């Protein structure tokens, strides 16, 4: 069927011709009015495990559900929720929308002396429609690099702007960042999609993997495997304890602090401890003067990465050694206040803080929630004037971001609250519709989306047609 808006596969509706699953189901194309084509038997992409031989180092298939043993996960608490999925996958549920999760592998990338210096491999569905995969390679141990990476970091971004072809929502692809003695190559499923002449000057770097679901939409990202050249496993094992600062604003050195502290229990009897924090900077401030206040103790903080950019909205991870007097068995149960201070703080914000103490974490991933239910396509509408009284009303129903689509019955057009048109599309997926309207003067136009399930909340778009 030409002009297909979506497809019916495995009994569910999808917007992309690429879908994750096994076997060879019958596929029907669905046009903008919900009409189905005759069935066609799908092609199944053969599996390819040869890439594993190229990872000379550490390969994680996420069979071990103790995530903290191998990674630090950075993201908004409650909005970035890791879980263990079927088949040994890491599933990151992001129900709040507009969130990014960043995994810092405790295993560093170590370059060798051959023509191929090293590679990082990620098998994930993060780079699907409206989503993004970011692979950062940076010396040091930053937890996140923000929008402006350090000058000596290597950043690879894969999103809708990067070829080749269509990546279906929820479909795993293999992305490889290959560092060579004459530049960087980026591969998708073995095919080259980008190059850069950059050759890193460092020999060791942290690997940060950032995943972002479709913007402004509660999302879910799956990671099936990560491979890193060089080391054979994590450098060290630590137990992490998240800390919440009394205020997320970095204070001036002598500014009054709120009387909010943190429990000292993780530090009692520990052989050593380290405080790590990530700060987003405003339009000023000196990170060399950053200190963390834990009760009456002041912990100097130092950058965990070199070559950091001091530009506005840049992000920097800092680390500080907790003084021995806070590690004793006796002493107060709480450390109040807990805040960060810096001269010329100027709107700097605390993004994340946590303690690291030596040991083996017992935190285990829970089972990931079930696959999210089908969602309605996103509706947009605009009016294009074509003459004194004529105009075109263009309605677009876009479901490319959805892992599966809730069928729609159609939409209605109201002019000044009166029904002017009904466009049926029973069992439809979406598509583009253009209606010609002839109206004199100024009017209010509303387009109402009608789901096939009457229990679903409908959506509407209001427009103004203004003529003098």
Image: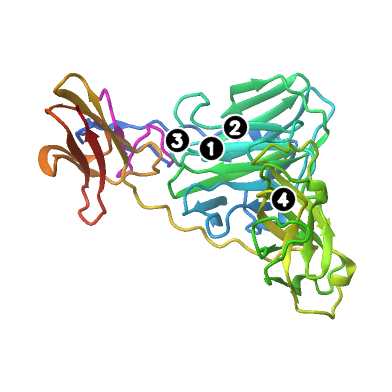
Please give the residue where the numbered disc 4 appears in the rendered image: 345
Q: Nearer the viewer, mark 4 or mark 2?
A: 4
Q: Secondary structure at mark 3?
A: loop
Other residues around mark 2 within 10 Å, as few (<14) / some (14–19) / many (≥20): some
Please give the residue where the numbered disc 3 appears in the rendered image: 129
Give the magenta-colored segment's residue range.
Answer: 1-20
| Residue 323 makes an appearance in the image | yes
Other residues around mark 3 within 10 Å, as few (<14) / some (14–19) / many (≥20): many
Whether residues under marks 2 and 1 lie with C-beta atoms below 8 angstroms apart, the answer is yes
Q: Secondary structure at mark 1?
A: strand
Please give the residue where the numbered disc 1 appears in the rendered image: 132
| Residue 237 makes an appearance in the image | no
Distance of mark 1 from mark 4, alpha carbons?
31 Å
Whether residues under marks 3 and 1 lie with C-beta atoms below 8 angstroms apart, the answer is no
Please give the residue where the numbered disc 2 appears in the rendered image: 157
Which of 309 and 110 lies nearest the eye of the viewer?
309
Expressed as whole percent of the image width and height from the top left, the position of residue 46 reads 50, 32
Q: What colouring style does the render use?
A: rainbow
Distance of mark 3 from mark 2, alpha carbons?
14 Å
Q: Secondary structure at mark 2?
A: strand
Distance of mark 3 from mark 1, alpha carbons?
8 Å
């Amino acid at each position: 069927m030409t002009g297909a808006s979506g497809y019916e596969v495995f009994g569910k509706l999808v917007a992309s011709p690429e879908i994750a699953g096994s076997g060879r189901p019958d596929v029907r194309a669905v046009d903008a009015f919900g009409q189905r084509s005759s069935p066609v038997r799908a092609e199944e992409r053969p599996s390819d495990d040869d890439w594993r031989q190229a990872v000379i180092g550490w390969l994680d298939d996420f069979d071990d559900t103790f995530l903290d043993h191998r990674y630090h996960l950075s993201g908004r608490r409650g909005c970035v929720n890791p879980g263990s999925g079927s088949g040994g996958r890491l599933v990151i549920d992001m129900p709040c929308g507009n969130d990014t999760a960043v995994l810092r592998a405790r295993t560093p990338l170590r370059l060798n002396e051959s023509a191929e210096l090293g590679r990082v491999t990620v098998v994930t569905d993060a780079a699907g429609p409206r989503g993004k995969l970011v692979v950062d390679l940076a010396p040091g141990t930053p937890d996140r690099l923000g929008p402006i990476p350090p000058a000596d970091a290597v950043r690879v971004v894969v999103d809708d702007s990067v070829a080749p072809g269509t990546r279906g929502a929820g479909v795993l692809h293999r992305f490889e960042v290959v560092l060579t003695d004459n530049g960087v190559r980026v591969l998708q499923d073995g095919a080259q999609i980008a190059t850069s002449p950059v050759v890193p000057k460092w020999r060791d770097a942290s690997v940060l993997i950032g995943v972002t679901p479709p913007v402004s939409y509660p999302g879910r990202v799956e990671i099936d495997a990560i491979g890193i050249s060089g080391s054979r496993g994590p450098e060290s094992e630590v137990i992490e304890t998240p800390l919440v600062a009394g205020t997320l604003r970095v204070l001036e050195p002598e500014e009054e602090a709120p009387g909010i502290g943190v429990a000292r229990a993780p530090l009692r009897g520990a052989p050593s401890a380290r405080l790590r924090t990530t700060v987003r900077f405003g339009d000023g401030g000196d990170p060399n003067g950053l200190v963390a206040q834990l009760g009456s103790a002041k912990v100097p903080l130092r950058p965990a990465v070199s070559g950091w950019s001091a530009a506005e909205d840049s992000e920097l991870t800092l680390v500080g050694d907790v003084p021995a007097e806070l590690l004793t068995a006796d002493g107060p149960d709480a450390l109040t206040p807990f805040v960060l201070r810096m001269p010329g703080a100027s709107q700097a914000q605390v993004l994340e803080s946590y303690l690291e103490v030596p040991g083996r974490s017992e935190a285990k991933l829970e089972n990931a929630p079930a696959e999210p239910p089908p969602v309605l396509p996103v509706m947009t509408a605009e009016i294009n004037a074509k003459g004194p009284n004529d105009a075109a009303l263009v309605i677009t129903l876009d479901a490319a971001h959805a892992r599966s689509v809730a069928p729609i019955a159609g939409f209605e057009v109201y002019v000044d609250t009166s029904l002017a048109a009904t466009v049926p599309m029973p069992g439809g997926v979406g598509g583009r519709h253009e209606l010609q309207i002839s109206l004199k003067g100024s009017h209010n136009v509303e387009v109402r989306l009608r789901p096939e399930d009457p229990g679903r909340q409908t959506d509407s778009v209001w427009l103004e047609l203004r003529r003098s």
